[in-house]
Image (cartoon, coloured by chain):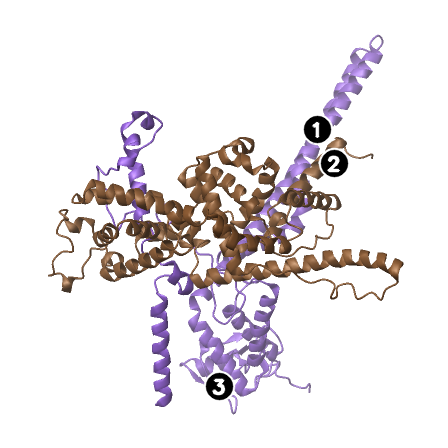
Amino acid sequence: MASEDARYRLSSQYRLWSFSRAELASLREKSNSLARASISERLSRASSSSDKNNNDRSASTSNANTPDPDGASFRLPEFLTVADESLMTTFYTTQLLGAGSATGLSDEICATAAAFFRRFYITNSIMTYSPQDMMIVALFFACKAEGWFTRVTDFLKMGSFQSLKKQPEDILAGEFLFCQGIRFAFDVRHPFRPLIGAGMELRRLGDIKEERIRAAEERAKSILRFSSLATDAYFHYTPSQIMLAALSLADRELAERLIHETFHHITPPADNGTPANGGDGAPKDSRQPKGENKEAIIGQEIRDKVLGAIEACREIMAHEMPERSKEHWQSIDMYQDLILPIKKKLKKCRDPDRSNLVALQRARRETALKKGDSEDGDPEDRGGTVDDDAAVFGEATRDAKRRKVAKGLDDPFGGPL
Amino acid sequence: MPVLTSDDMCLVCKTIRYLNKDMEFLINPECYHSMCSNCVNRLFNDGPNQCPYAGCHKTLRRKGFRSAFFGDLTVEREVDIRRRVAAVFNRVEDDFETLRDYNNYLQMVEDLTFDLVSGTDAGRRDAEATLQQWEASHKAEIERNRKAGRDADEMTRRRVNAERDAARQRRVDALREAEDEKVERARSREAELDSLAQGAAPGGGDGQRVQLKRRGQINRATAAAAAAALEPSAVSAGAGPVSSGALASASFSSASGALAEVGRLSIRGLKEKRKPAAAEGPYDPFGGMDFVPSRYRVRGGLDHPWLDKYRLDRSYATGGYSFDEYTRRAMFEAFAGLGVFVDDEKEVGIGLSAREVATIGAGIAAVGDRMELD
């Protein structure tokens, strides 16, 4: 196994956030159905309690034959489908990218935010947490993850974020939740730096015109800024594969040249053939790995596999070329035709308990405090999804501890003897 | 005429004790038939011979004869067998993980012993075979355990001896101290008398006080000395009888614990062998990860127009920024994960493609079909 691949396999991007297509589909399906179940339960509970009130009132006045409380009077709304959700996710990803670049955040920050955002909505549903809220949280947190630290207040004053009319609490309330949603994997491997590496390698070859390389790089970079982020490329392919796919979308020949140069090893029996590219003046053996598994690392078989993967990645990304950012995702027609209907549906089937993140956060704090008071009060009945981890990650216990200390401080010398 | 028992009469030569006061009966653990020493000398002087008892076909040697410790020869035999079994199965409780395992082991040993002592013929033969086989296959361990036991015994004995010596020493010290005290008392008494004789009238009270004071001092001094002498003795005397056993067992356990790591195949619950840490060589913080690139080579002079700013502007380098470091990273990232095929790996594991697995499965199925057809 090539050492580079082994090192990539250690990254959280590979371990936690790489999926095969089937896996990804089933995950989305699962989070969608989970959200459906919990929301319908919550909605029916809310409506039944309100129903009861109504019934009580009506019973006192009209003495009507009341139906059973959770009966036909309440009907579940139409939920978003998985396809609706992924459309919404993509739509808000494009929004996020647009807002980020309009505000002047760096490519890495925008890309990280978009990757976070998409990751978050794999295990969470649009219906559970509002994408508008999460979008700004993702952007803010991506700034931190990329090492650009700014205050929330300053952040909200930047460029286009002012128009969002958000309060610092809105961001902070969702932040921890968001981190849980992305499973605390803050390192996103982007294809931008690989693109520079590829540019270096192409220039080293010496027989390609500088203008051509430069044009290809510019184009590839603009593709990487949008296409790879608005699609599922990050989940299915590694940064270098994404980079090569973008390069191949920009200039297919260059990408293939680079691959052929890299996987240049020819098995000994076929060695009498001509070298793949005559232009390569460098002695070949100097680049070859020492071990006898050259074939496995830079042989032809793996080259064909890599080419296949890049072709597939290219196909995905070709659906969302950077031009679509403006032409499609920002067009009024598209919004009216596709997004508005979903939004209307969403309004009805939104999770009633989680629509207001600030209130949710406050409620959690309070329950944590209450827990601290009663030490072992029975745990709040919760839905058993990712967002229940506040207790696991120590928020509750930490508060409880603080509480204890504070109690102890009232009487530094202890209670009466 | 008194009834002649086998204690009084040799059943081989019919000599009775009356005729030979010094008659000594010997037995051989081969068959436990007793006979007098004269008979033994007579019969076995010229080498091995058959047991003279009718119906006993054991071949005995003179060397094997000894006098019985117990009057009852069945007891003698049982003790011998038990000794032999205990020499072979010589594990201690510390060798086992739980008490239950140890008890199971004891049960197993006891079953074997019972078979040997009072089992049927077949049972005895089986038990004997088991015992011998065990002894042969676990010689080293048995020897080690025995040595551990011996060491522990030795240590216990030494400790007991040391304790006895200390006690004697204390006793001697106490005697000497008593002697000293007596002398001291006599001397002080003399001094008292002297002082009374010298300063009688004016400083009478004074003298008395001096005396009292001195006596008090002396008392205190003697008390302190006694306490000092007593302290170690008291401590060790108090703890001695109780703790010597405990200490002995502790040392025993530690000694045998060191040798406890003898794994046996059929004894369950033995403690895990504590292996000495294997020499691992120097610590590798990267866990053996290879950092030599295998798909590319980082050359000098790699360059990119986007990065000219950082390469040429010296103000970046002052902060410790190394352009080479950046190129190395960019090159690494450009080639890292090229051979990682997420779609395949997440489905079927690293190194296989989904299609390969499918073909393998098909192959297996095909073979299975063929086998069924066969």
Which of the marked residues, 1 or 3, is nearer the chain's N terminus? Answer: 3
* Amino acid on which disc 1 is placed: Val
Query: Could you tell me which chain the residue with mark 3 belongs to?
Result: B
Residue A407's label in the rendered image is 2
Instruction: Tell me which chain appears brown.
Output: A
* Amino acid on which disc 2 is placed: Lys
Q: Which residue does the numbered mark 3 point to in the structure image?
A: B51
Q: Which residue does the numbered mark 1 point to in the structure image?
A: B183
Apparent side of residue B324 relative to residue B113 in the rendered image (left or right): left
Among the 4 quarters of the image, the one containing residue B46? bottom left
User: Of helix, strand and loop, which one carries label 1?
Assistant: helix
Task: Please state which of residues B315 and B63 is positioned toward the viewer in this rendering.
Answer: B315
Residue A84: horizontal and vertical position, in percent?
52, 58
Contact, CB < 8 Å: mark 2 with mark 3? Answer: no
Instruction: Tell me which chain appears purple.
Output: B
* Amino acid on which disc 3 is placed: Cys
Q: In which quadrant will I find the C terminus of chain B?
A: bottom left
Q: How many other residues sit within 10 Å of disc 1, few (<14), some (14-19) or many (≥20)?
A: few
Apparent side of residue B174 relative to residue B121 in the rendered image (left or right): right
Task: Please state which of residues B236 and A160 is positioned toward the viewer in this rendering.
Answer: A160
* Viewer-side label of 1, 2: 2
Mark 1–mark 2 Cα distance, whole angstroms, equals: 69 Å
Residue farthest along the front direction in this orientation: A333
Asked whether the viewer can see residue A125, the reply is no
Contact, CB < 8 Å: mark 1 with mark 2? Answer: no
Mark 2–mark 3 Cα distance, whole angstroms, equals: 92 Å
User: Of helix, strand and loop, which one carries label 2?
Assistant: helix
Q: In which quadrant will I find the N terminus of chain B?
A: bottom right
